[in-house]
Image: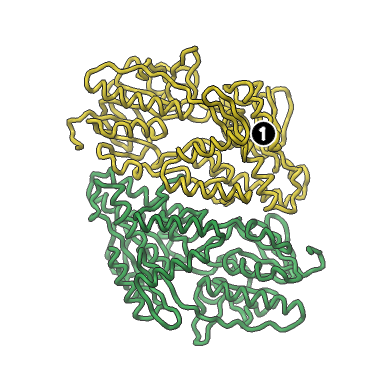
Chain colours: A yellow, B green
Amino acid sequence: MMTQNLPHIVIVGAGFGGMETAKKLKNAPVRITLIDRQNYHLFQPLLYQIAIAGVVPSQIAYPLRAIFRRQKNLNFQMGEVTGIDLDARYVRLNGSVIAYDVLVLAVGGQTNFFGMKSVEERGFQVKDIESAVKTRNHLLDMFEQASREADAEKRRALLTFVVAGGGPTGVETAGALGELITHVMAKDYPHMDLNEVRVILLEAGGSLMGVYPEELRKATFDLLRGKNVEIMLNVKLENYNGEQITFGDGRRIRTRTLIWTAGVRAAGMLDSLGVQQAGSGRVRVDSSLRVPTHPEVFVIGDAAYLENGNGQPLPMLATVAQQQANVTAQNIQKIIKGREPEPFHYKDPGLLATVGRNAAVARIFGLSFSGFIAWLIWVVLHIYRLIGFRNRLLVLINWAWDYLFYETQVRLITKE
Amino acid sequence: MMTQNLPHIVIVGAGFGGMETAKKLKNAPVRITLIDRQNYHLFQPLLYQIAIAGVVPSQIAYPLRAIFRRQKNLNFQMGEVTGIDLDARYVRLNGSVIAYDVLVLAVGGQTNFFGMKSVEERGFQVKDIESAVKTRNHLLDMFEQASREADAEKRRALLTFVVAGGGPTGVETAGALGELITHVMAKDYPHMDLNEVRVILLEAGGSLMGVYPEELRKATFDLLRGKNVEIMLNVKLENYNGEQITFGDGRRIRTRTLIWTAGVRAAGMLDSLGVQQAGSGRVRVDSSLRVPTHPEVFVIGDAAYLENGNGQPLPMLATVAQQQANVTAQNIQKIIKGREPEPFHYKDPGLLATVGRNAAVARIFGLSFSGFIAWLIWVVLHIYRLIGFRNRLLVLINWAWDYLFYETQVRLITKE
């Protein structure tokens, strides 16, 4: 099956885009090398649950070698790509050189701090397992420190949790954090005055969930307020020194915790390719998701810049990456046969975000839902989409337990 | 309930000894402060399972605040004790001073490298969650590196795994590692020649499981050989440079992995107390587990040195710590009432160690078992003893799955 004469497809990145492209090429007459820095695929939509001690990494990550165990035309290599030569058609990895016939760049995005060094150094992130675990350890440690802090002002700074960014990650994190405090921490720290705890969500724009329709933006706002989250709109964060946030208008918040979810850009490694990039560093691709100057190179997912019908860039969402992966797998097979690739058209499957227990907002088939029904849809969809039957089962048991007993499993502070 | 006039019991360490002492004082007229460096109790007997990617930390660790949520006379404090003044009767913690009426030191043990700096620096350990996760990441990374290593000699060094120490931890780790390779890695790395993989167990003495009766030592040896573990007895490790082990007789093994389980001593913090210590740094206690010069200070578990009837020191085992905790909780209540404390007598409940799937050795009620029956006893006992119903359920599902499908869940390489 794996002969040297077959075209060599190199896929960089095993997120939703890269993984799906590889899977869809299972029966194609190609050799595939799939490369990722990690040895696992991460179910990114639930990453915020690690940060608030709701799930553990193994519940939302699955080893790539296990996923592709039965795919004979695929070879996985773990490592960091240190260079790509588009003209010579090779990728540098672990000190070797890997030549390709077709390259798929599905390298995803990274946090954008918009040049704010102070936030990058002292803020927390929810961008990968490591940063989410670090955030979890920090949050739990703040409660431990507060439990023995006699100075009221210092204690309030320890118990003020600020989430920056009113998009899905920020909203989900803030909502889940509000619940963790009300339902779990209240039991773990019976001597603590929970009125001293604040969860604050910051948004630079005029509303939460900017891309959602008006009624859902409003619903998100109301649901979050119901979880005791304070919402500050139209605020411009200017500096964070680890103790205090300073805003553009001179206001300040004393806090030991700033979780930054307010910016995302395409992976930095794309900057050195020497190809045209749009805002946020995304690579400009043609209608078939190829680099115009190098038609054997596909760029998909968060890394790619393509506009939809009405001139807006496609959002950085798993659904976009997955649809692009499907088309790209088909187009690779067409190119191999000497045919023309098809253009990509995004089919919007709707919007869905959770705000916490019993609370989510959704827009599906043109209908808006919020509250319990939307939350049920969210639970079913997310558990179904989680890779691996066992993981689904474990997450389901965990969540059922949490739901029934207002409990979370994993409040462990582990050293890094 | 929690009044200042009640005697203040300070317990340092929330392992089996400290946790049980605290629990048994639930209804006593005392104030308890329980101190631990971690915010969780760790089920140490399954720690080796983290190292071989069999379970994740949250399955064998449980938050202390959750365990003691309903115990109104107890206050938990997370932190590192930085000093103890036995004459002035206080403990230093997190920059504060905590005065006690009765002190219970249940601080456990730590790895003993017997002064071998090279092993301490380059060897791996299975002593806490962090070191076990580090070991897991390293083991998995060795396979990743080997999968792309063309040089046969380097590849063999990557695929040679050496475990030092023929006690329970070493035997369990080596056996589980042998199985991981035969049953799991063989599927994950179909292109790899598994004949290049070696698992070697080193023991300085003449037999494995030295404290066990002869027939079980023999059974352990045979069971391990059946798991493809090479066993080297009577070997003295002299140096490890990260690439190669050198023995006293000049022999060498090229390996990138040395897991050191060959020595344990009492926690180093005991050395600065200024009390009499026996070998391995354990504090010499009277028959009621008290420091002779300071009868208000109890030392229990691995930290305590006490001989059994036939002049042998009590082993560093969870069962010893738990029995000592029960007696200590009773004795504390006696002392408070002005009565004399009782002496401690160890009741040996038997021995039990697993060598892998379907394989364990046990000695219970004077009978020796080995093989499948012993393994079943081990599984039932360990799952039952795991704290928390949910944890038991999750571990059970995991293990049932692994057993049926020769699979392990958590082969994630996470950065530290």
Above or below B359: residue B244: above
The chain containing the residue under callout 1 comes to A
> Does residue B48 appear anywhere in the picture?
yes
Q: Amino acid at mark 1?
A: Leu
Circle 1 packing at 10 Å, graded few (<14), some (14-19), many (20+), is many
For residue B187, side relative to residue A405 (left or right): left
Dividing the picture into quadrants, the one containing residue A157 is top right
Residue at x 54%, y 22% (from the top left corner): A366
| x, y percent for residue B327 | 63, 77
For residue B225, side relative to residue A265 (left or right): left
SS state under label 1: helix
Residue at x 49%, y 87% (from the top left corner): B310
Q: Name the residue at the top extreme.
A: A310
> Does residue A122 appear anywhere in the picture?
no
Q: Which residue is tagged 1? A: A224
Q: Nearer the viewer, residue A165 or A330?
A: A330
| x, y percent for residue B200 | 31, 63
Q: Nearer the viewer, residue A20 or A272?
A: A20
Residue at x 29%, y 24% (from the top left corner): A332
Q: Nearer the viewer, residue B26 or A269?
A: B26
